[in-house]
Image (cartoon, helix red, strand yellow):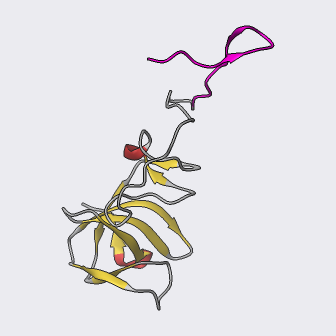
């Protein structure tokens, strides 16, 4: 491991800022495929905390698709449809605001938005 840069005024290594859970807040952020890795500038799946830099991280909350519904690229009715989610399919929700839930679905972890009313709490 390379030594940390020293603070010339103190003659000792500069402290490295870390978050409350110990992840370093410095260094380059990776840019994995956003179609299958849930991250935005303001929010990312906590599983990506060591790979991408975001303002906040969230633990996914399991929901179930209540009836067939489109997975969309943006939280807008007129946005591109990325695919159709089947009734009963699990949806890992990271954000729910203004009537839209953001997260990922299916074994392929397709990331996108779905109308909040299309989701149910699993039994």
Q: Where residue 56 appears, x then y in whole percent?
A: 55, 49
> Percent x, y for residue 86?
20, 78
Identify the residue shown where x is 43% and y is 67%.
Answer: 102
Q: Residue furthest bottom?
A: 78
The answer to whether residue 73 is left or right of residue 76 is: left
State the residue at coordinates (58%, 29%).
Answer: 18
Decide if residue 106 is on the left or right side of residue 120: left
Q: Vertical placement of 120 versus 58: above or below?
A: below
In the rendered image, which quarter is residue 112 located in? bottom left
Q: How many numbered callouts? A: 0
Of residues 14 and 66, the one nearer the viewer is: 14
- Image quadrant of residue 9? top right
Q: Quadrant of residue 61?
A: bottom left
Image quarter (top left, top right, bottom left or bottom right) of the N terminus: top left
Q: Classify residue 38 as left or right of residue 91.
A: right
**Residue 95 placement (x, y as % from top left):** 48, 62
Q: Main secondary structure of the magenta part?
A: loop
Q: Is residue 93 magenta?
A: no
Q: Nearer the viewer, residue 62 or 29?
A: 29
Please provide the residue range marked out in magenta. 1-18
In magenta stretch: residue 6: yes
Image quadrant containing the C terminus: bottom left
In the depicted structure, whether residue 56 falls above or below residue 76: above
Image x and y of residue 98, in percent: 57, 74
């Amino acid at each position: 491991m390379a030594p940390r840069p020293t603070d010339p005024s103190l003659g000792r290594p500069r402290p490295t800022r870390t978050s409350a859970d110990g992840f370093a807040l410095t260094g380059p952020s990776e840019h994995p495929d956003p179609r299958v890795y849930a991250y935005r500038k303001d929010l990312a799946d906590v599983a990506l905390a060591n790979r991408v830099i975001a303002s906040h991280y969230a633990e996914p909350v399991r929901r179930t698709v209540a009836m067939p519904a489109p997975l969309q690229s943006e939280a807008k009715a007129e946005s591109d449809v990325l695919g159709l989610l089947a009734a009963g399919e699990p949806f890992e929700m990271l954000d729910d605001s203004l009537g839209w839930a953001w997260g990922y679905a299916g074994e392929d972890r397709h990331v996108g938005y779905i109308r909040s009313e299309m989701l149910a709490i699993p039994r």
